[in-house]
Image (cartoon, coloured by chain):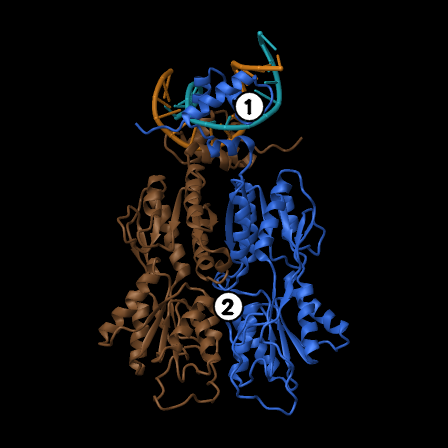
Chain colours: A blue, B brown, C cyan, D orange
Amino acid sequence: MAERRPTIADVARRAGVSKGTVSFALNGRPGVAAATRERILEAAEALNWRPNHRARSLSVSRAFALGLVIARDPSLLGSDPFFPTFIAGVETVLAERGQALVLQVAGGGQAETEGYRRLAQDGRVDGVFLTDLRRHDPRITLVDALGLPAVTLNRPDVPSPFPAVCLDDRPGIAAVVDHLVGLGHTRIAHVAGPDDFLHGHGRRKAFLDALAAQGLPAGRVEVSDFTASGGTAATRRLLDAPDPPTAIVYANDLMAIAGINVAHGLGISVPARLSVAGFDDTELSAHLHPPLTTVRTDVFGWGQVAARSLLALIDGESTGDVELEPARLVVRRSTAPPSAPSETSPATPYPTPEES
Amino acid sequence: MAERRPTIADVARRAGVSKGTVSFALNGRPGVAAATRERILEAAEALNWRPNHRARSLSVSRAFALGLVIARDPSLLGSDPFFPTFIAGVETVLAERGQALVLQVAGGGQAETEGYRRLAQDGRVDGVFLTDLRRHDPRITLVDALGLPAVTLNRPDVPSPFPAVCLDDRPGIAAVVDHLVGLGHTRIAHVAGPDDFLHGHGRRKAFLDALAAQGLPAGRVEVSDFTASGGTAATRRLLDAPDPPTAIVYANDLMAIAGINVAHGLGISVPARLSVAGFDDTELSAHLHPPLTTVRTDVFGWGQVAARSLLALIDGESTGDVELEPARLVVRRSTAPPSAPSETSPATPYPTPEES
DNA sequence: TTGTATGCGTTATCAT
DNA sequence: ATGATAACGCATACAA
């Protein structure tokens, strides 16, 4: 005799009314006499009735869930701090609203499209987050065609019907460049992310713009892929060049850390002979030696705001684009004035690390 | 006139049969005449009918989704490579079976319990993964009481009704110790994970057991927390001690990397004066300088097998516990023979890094 | 071999 | 103004 979960029919029977009236009463809708409402609430309470989520989902045609499709090489996903932090931010909002997060990890581009399509066709979610925007991102029209509400992280470079939740990278990159120029650097290079990602592209442009604003010639840019191995290769190319840079601005911490290690391997000490700056402010970067100068963005908050925006959009009360606090510089010990050209690498140990 | 999606009633009408017959025909159940079946399939094809996922979910009382509750401090979640990789493995299996993954990130213990409860009560998922097992983990009985099928990652230390998907850490740790002893080390320390995690506890025990098996006295163990900051502090404590170790075995790569940086800060070169080994084989560890000797586990495969096991359990065809390929040692350059006691830190640059 | 009723909560429509 | 009824979506136990 499995204790069957009470249904709305049980409540209706006990209160002596119809199912419809129970529904109206419990959802606080008008058209129910106060006395009747009271009776219904008591019956529901007595039976400890909770609406069946699946039935509710069916009748209102809502999933009460949001979707996130991650298109990344699984083997590299583990070293990216973005998604876990972003998801954690999203979750804080969803948890208090009874919403769930449905995740998909898609390898290649084909699987990605299929992922959105499945989420939409199965009605698994009421809306999706569009992260890691690419240039001329096909997902904008795809998701729109699927009839799925969405928010984009930052603004796409194509017309978009979706609200954008924006966190501007560029001030952070500009601040790094200004910081390095202020220290006396003139040969500054950049290790960029893939150029088809909007953020990779944007950080690169911000780098070049900031140099130009400082009246310096364009620095060398090595396009890489946000991975440690890519950062290693790009750094080798830069440091093996005839006129190597005295400072390198990386598009993320992972490549920067790999870069520092390449420098160490070449006997080039950081920051004495090479200044290095990252981007992300991962937990590790403060605990390196030297601790990494980097750029911090509030990814957790980004997730929170994106979730709120998407839920508002789904509820038909979109507030339009949102602008978050831009990225900002965190100065630590991996950046310092360039050494005099004649000076050789000093063998002195680094000063004790200290958080800025 | 929104083009209403065709329903099973439309198909039934077109084929001149009842809804029930359509359902039987399309699910390949017996009791439908071949000619009738053919007619129904044609009608469904012509109308391009797809079953409504939500209605299906309601009628069969299944969510066609699995759940994962992650109880981690959100600010530290980003530096842990485990979950993204595990999830990616899970997804490869779910994608081809039309299943979804519902994720919850819960901060403290209270929120964690609430997370499982919500998943169960709302019928959001048909089963859950129990990861990061703790000693006397209360989730075993909780999830069982909630009537939710589950698989555990490794075996709990309490009686469990759930299949376990096991990947043994211990051979990896033992191999590290053997490797270090083989190099000539006798003062080997361990920086452990939190002792209430079974894997933190297990790696520590494996470390001590391996030393004992080698006939060496118990090495010093610093219990830490898997974070860079924790690894930094623990390493300081070890290296500041009167009789510092010549090798440190860390319970994860993140702490090991932080440890290497502490050593650098103290002018202690790795591996010349201190050997360091990690655990995880994160992407970065091969690109450090020196590249990190560590232990590799197939987290992606773990996710795949766990997903298959959980789905099998839900379908009532559980295959019992599963044992995966155990963790195995990856020797790189961060481990070397201990220097002679009298020898001071050599200032020679590291050899060029090379993957083992 | 096929049709019907039931399970679910919500809501449009109808009846008082 | 209040409340009852039926329909929505699919699968399945049961009746015919």
Look at the picture and state if B282 lies above or below A118: below
**Helix, strand or loop for disc 1:** helix
User: Residue B133, percent across and down?
Assistant: 35, 54
Q: Nearer the viewer, residue B348 or B46?
A: B348
Could you tell me if residue B326 is visible in this image? Answer: no
Residue B187 picture quarter: bottom left
Q: Residues within 10 Å of mark 2 (few under 14, many from 20)?
A: many
Point 47% across, 67% down: residue: B229
Point 31% across, 62% down: residue: B202
Disc 2 target residue? A284
Looking at the rendered structure, the number of numbered marks drawn on it comes to: 2
Residue B1 picture quarter: top right
Residue at mark 1 shares a chain with residue at mark 2: yes
Whether residue B310 sits left or right of residue A122 in the image: it is: left
User: Residue A86, percent across and down?
Assistant: 55, 55
Look at the picture and state if A182 lies above or below B115: below
Disc 1 target residue? A24
**Helix, strand or loop for disc 2:** helix
User: Residue A239, percent across and down?
Assistant: 60, 82
Whether residue B165 sits left or right of residue A211 in the image: it is: left
Closer to the chain start, of discs 1 and 2, is 1
Q: Nearer the viewer, residue B230 or B306?
A: B230
Q: Residues within 10 Å of mark 1 (few under 14, many from 20)?
A: some
Amino acid residing under circle 2: Leu
Amino acid residing under circle 1: Phe
